[in-house]
Amino acid sequence: MKIAVTSRGTDLDAAVDPRFGRAAYILIIDSDTRAFEVLDNQENVDAFQGAGIQAAVMISDKGADVLLTGYCGPKAFETLQAAGIKVVNDAVGTVDAVVRDFKDGKFSIAQSANVEGHW
């Protein structure tokens, strides 16, 4: 399974970035091998609009099955749902810790966005 996690840094010890569309980085982690790829999300950080949709397309193109993040807006959530990517909101801690917690069943899959757009 490929797990996308919003991140403030480029390694597994980095803090989760609470913003999805405007996260500094998104790490795509293989849940079995723990190998990961870093996606630089800089072009979306300062986007006027559409940051969440563009980030959703980016992680979909990388084959992500689930997204772990703090907050996900309605348009990004719809785009992720359409791509078949499950969303987990309210993830806090390091990238490594939230991936472990997800694998241990400590998170539930979100049924809707948890913030308004342009957060």
Image (cartoon, rainbow, N blue to C red):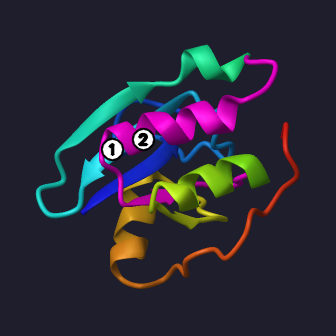
* Mark 2, other Cα within 10 Å: few <14 / some 14–19 / many ≥20: many
**Name of the residue lying farthest toward the front:** 82
Query: Which amino acid does the dot numbered 1 rest on?
Result: Ile
Q: State the residue lying farthest toward the left.
A: 33
Query: Relative to residue 20, is residue 58 drawn left or right?
Result: left
Residue placed at 72% from the left, 29% from the top? Answer: 50
Residue 90 visible in the shown view = yes
| 8, above or below 67, in the image | above
Q: Residue at x 42, y 41 (%)?
A: 59
Q: Nearer the viewer, mark 2 or mark 1?
A: 2
Which disc is residue 28 wearing? 1
Magenta segment, which residues?
Answer: 47-73
Residue type of the residue flagged with mark 2: Ile
- Going from N to C along the chain, the mark reached first, 2 or 1, is 1
Q: Quadrant of the C terminus?
A: top right
Which quadrant is home to the N terminus? Answer: bottom left
- Secondary structure at badge 1 equals strand
Image point (55%, 35%), residue name: 55
Q: Is residue 13 left or right of residue 73?
A: left
Observer-nearest of 79 and 40: 79
Q: Is residue 23 magenta?
A: no
**x then y, percent, for residue 36:** 24, 41
Which residue is nearer to you in this view: 64 or 101?
64
